[in-house]
Amino acid sequence: MNNPTKNRLITEDEAIELTMTSNNLTAGLDAIETIALNLKCKDKKEVDQLAGLIAGMKALSTKNSNFLENLVMKF
């Protein structure tokens, strides 16, 4: 069954809210990454993997934030 995607224009306020949420997410990931890197545990490899995963999530969040900021500038 083919379900077509419905598109809806967003308002400027919605775009600003999405941008702010994305920025907050990035800041939270920064804090979590710092905590992970400062953990004292036996398996450093697991901490490094966790930090790498968080860094990847931050990169995606930053891309999203940049996209949304460019979108807001067009309003």
Image: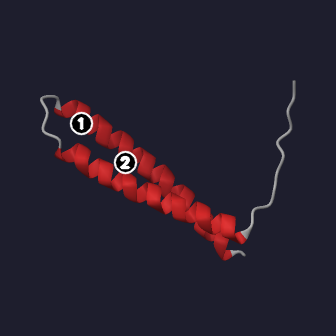
Front-most of residues 3 and 24: 24
Residue occupying the point 31% across, 48% down = 32
Question: As displayed, is residue 38 above or below residue 14?
Answer: above
Question: In what quadrant of the picture does the N terminus appear?
Answer: top right
* Residue 60 in picture, x, y percent from top left: 50, 50
* Residue 69 in picture, x, y percent from top left: 59, 69
User: How would you rate the neighbour count of disc 1 (Cα within 10 Å): few for under 14, some for 14-19, many for 20 or more?
Assistant: some
In the rendering, which numbered label is found on residue 75? none
Does residue 8 appear left or right of residue 45 in this picture? right
Give the amino acid at mark 1.
Val
Give the amino acid at mark 2.
Ala
When asked about the image quadrant of residue 39, the answer is top left
Q: Is residue 67 visible?
A: no
Front-most of residues 55 and 30: 30
* Residue 33 in picture, x, y percent from top left: 30, 48
Front-most of residues 58 and 8: 8
Does residue 72 appear left or right of residue 64 in this picture? right
Residue occupying the point 31% across, 37% down = 50
Front-most of residues 31 and 1: 31
Q: CA distance from mark 1 to mark 2?
A: 12 Å
Question: As displayed, is residue 14 above or below residue 58?
Answer: below
Q: Is residue 57 visible?
A: yes
Q: Secondary structure at mark 2?
A: helix
The residue that mark 2 highlights is: 55
Q: Secondary structure at mark 1?
A: helix
The residue that mark 1 highlights is: 47
When asked about the image quadrant of residue 16, the answer is bottom right
Question: As displayed, is residue 41 above or below residue 26?
Answer: above
Q: Mark 1 or mark 2: which comes first in sequence?
A: 1
